Amino acid sequence: MSSGSAFDRAAPEEKEREGTMEGTIKQLCPGYSDGFYQLKARGFLAASLYWADENGPLPNWTSFAHFPIEPNGVGSYHMTGGRAVPDEATHVLMKAVSADLEATSAVLVPIPMPSNLPQKEPAQRFLVLSDLHLSSKPWQIRKALSMGKGWDGVLIPGDITNDGIAEQFMRFWQCVTEVIPQTPVFAVAGNHDYPVHPLPQICRRIEDYPALHKALLDRAANLGIPCQADSSGTFSAAFGDTEIFGLNAVTHWRKFRFPESAQLDWLANRLNHSSARNRIILCHAPLANHRPYHQPGDPPYLHLDKKLQGILDSQRDILFLSGHTHVSLNCQSGCIERDSIGNLYINTGSIRPTTLKPEEPLQPASWTEGNAIELEIGKTHICVKGISIKTGQYISRGYYRFPK
């Protein structure tokens, strides 16, 4: 357990109230944020928590908790979800606002069990963008894609377009080729990448998802990435120690359907013969047992959910990336789950505004801004960092670190 004394810096536009404040932290595991955070600040209304060092809050990181202060002057927060503490964080800044909302005060509290800083090592970096829902104005998508310049690749788990029409696919292709001309992009179909009703096409360029799918794989091959595609619609791409697999489980009328079981048979065979140390699977819909807010007995999105789950359960160290739900990375229970055999299930949010159920009394509007994900895969660790599309800040509740 750790406590701290008053921190005397305030933002220029804020008034600072002098007074005694005391913060305490009880972590459950070194290097992870789960635990209990308490602030004693009589006369204040609410508090916010930020990762910090001895000089103040870390730049470019969002807040990670907001909670009310009771009339007795004590406020507390129980952090869950398995998030990691940023490597450079040594303290937590606990900042309180007065009841009249005109004054603030803050205290720096040392983290009682700081993690040992991991050694820097070569790592592959992928930008993950989900649920783009491109329609007529692609500026936000161009901004999101630009984050991936110079990275190993961009991964898109579906819903590239909003209506599945030719103009939107051509617009997306133009964004990719203009914004990140040297970065490979891999995508799978989402339910919005097919029209509600099949329409005849007169365009002979990138007129639908299958045409985009082929164009992206051809482009990746031209950039030096070995790719294999199966007639069932699935594919794989090799990035040295990492192999990426794509599952296209959507058909016309926006139904989640695998074409019979050919894709899953191909996937099972490829996984069994893959020599890659890291295997990433892209699939628009999450599995029934690994989606945010799921309850026992909830119906699955995928009609072959159990078969796909069985394939993954027979493997180890799989990273399963899904979208579709638009759930905010800031949800209290977290959007990433690691099972008992080491497989990671990552629900990737959306670059569009996300949803956040009212599970906490105080939730800032910024917690539902669109997000990207930085996926870093090294020899000894896997890091996941959520990034705000609007501000470019790292999302504190979207940061996870897993040993390999």
Image (cartoon, grey):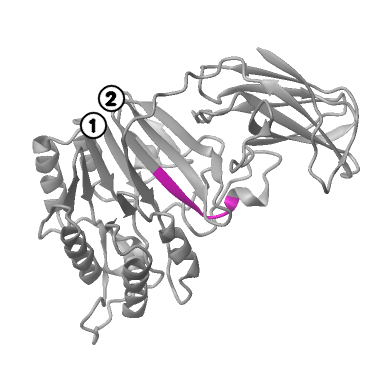
Callout 1 environment at 10 Å: few (<14), some (14 to 19), or many (20+)?
some
370 in the magenta segment:
yes
Asked whether, in this view, residue 15 is left or right of residue 234, the answer is: right
Q: Is residue 20 above or below residue 173?
A: above
Q: Which one is in front, 69 or 286? A: 69
Mark before the other along the chain sequence, 2 or 1: 1
Q: Quadrant of residue 227?
A: bottom left
Q: CA distance from mark 2 to mark 1?
A: 8 Å
Query: Mark 1: which amino acid?
Result: Asp
Q: Position of residue 275 (x, y in %)?
A: 12, 35
Q: Is residue 187 above or below residue 32?
A: below
Asked whether, in this view, residue 31 is left or right of residue 235, the answer is: right
Dividing the image into 4 quarters, which one contains the N terminus?
A: top right
Looking at the image, which residue is at 52% across and 34% down?
A: 333
Dividing the image into 4 quarters, which one contains the C terminus?
A: top left
**Range drawn in magenta:** 368-374
Looking at the image, which residue is at 76% across and 24% down?
A: 39
Circles 2, 1 touching at the beta carbon (< 8 Å): yes
Query: Mark 2: which amino acid?
Result: Ile
For mark 2, give the secondary structure. loop
Q: Residue furthest bottom?
A: 202
Q: Which residue is mark 1?
A: 313
Looking at the image, which residue is at 26% across and 73% down?
A: 208
Q: Is residue 282 visible?
A: yes
Q: Quadrant of residue 403?
A: top left
Callout 2 environment at 10 Å: few (<14), some (14 to 19), or many (20+)?
few
Q: Position of residue 391 (x, y in %)?
A: 58, 54
Q: Quadrant of residue 69?
A: top right
Q: Which residue is mark 2?
A: 341
Q: Is residue 307 above or below residue 162?
A: above
Q: Is residue 286 visible?
A: no
Q: Position of residue 122 (x, y in %)?
A: 31, 34
